[in-house]
Image (cartoon, rainbow, N blue to C red):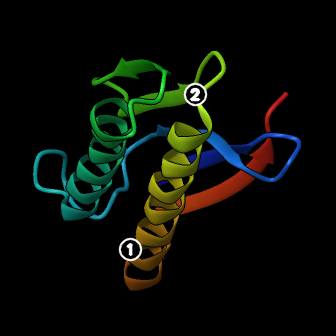
Amino acid sequence: MTKVVFFEDGDGRLCGFEAAGHAGYAESGRDIVCAAISALTQATVLGLEEVACAPVQTRTDEDTGYLRCMLSGSPKKEALDQAQVLFRTLEKALTAISNDYPGTIRIIIRERR
């Protein structure tokens, strides 16, 4: 199962996410759920960096299917607003996949410490 944790700041805004593990829907390399999760999370990072111009820090490990993406520094208001759209879109898309493929994704929203 892939576990995706979304992090909220103290004001209820999402400030990042962490995805880890393989969905387990099919064998590695043929798992459409893993492929979808990977495409969505990577597109979100790209959108944050290239469209929203939001400062982010990322960490990845392809062997374990790990991706962490967090806003860093003090994003401008416009970048922060666009980041919210991207994070919430990712959350909704992953929830839809989870509903269609039960037991493959666990989504958690946690306050950032």
Other-residue count near label 1 (Cα within 10 Å), few / some / many at <14 / 14–19 / ≥20: some
Residue 60 in the image, given as x and y percentages of width and height: 38, 21
Quarter holding the C terminus is top right
In front here: 20 or 110? 110
Residue 3 appears anywhere in the view: no
Mark 2 secondary-structure assignment: strand
Q: Amino acid at mark 2?
A: Leu
As drawn, 67 above or below 61: below
Label drawn at residue 71:
2
Asked whether 20 or 40 is in front, the reply is: 40
**Residue 7: where, in percent of width, then height?**
70, 42
The location of residue 99, given as percent across then percent down, is 47, 82
Report x, y in % for residue 11: 86, 48
Say which label, 1 or 2, has the lower sequence index.
2
- Mark 1: amino acid: Ile
Residue receiving disc 1: 97
- Residue drawn 44% across and 54% down? 86
Going by the image, does 109 lie left or right of 2? right
Mark-to-mark CA distance, 1 and 2: 25 Å
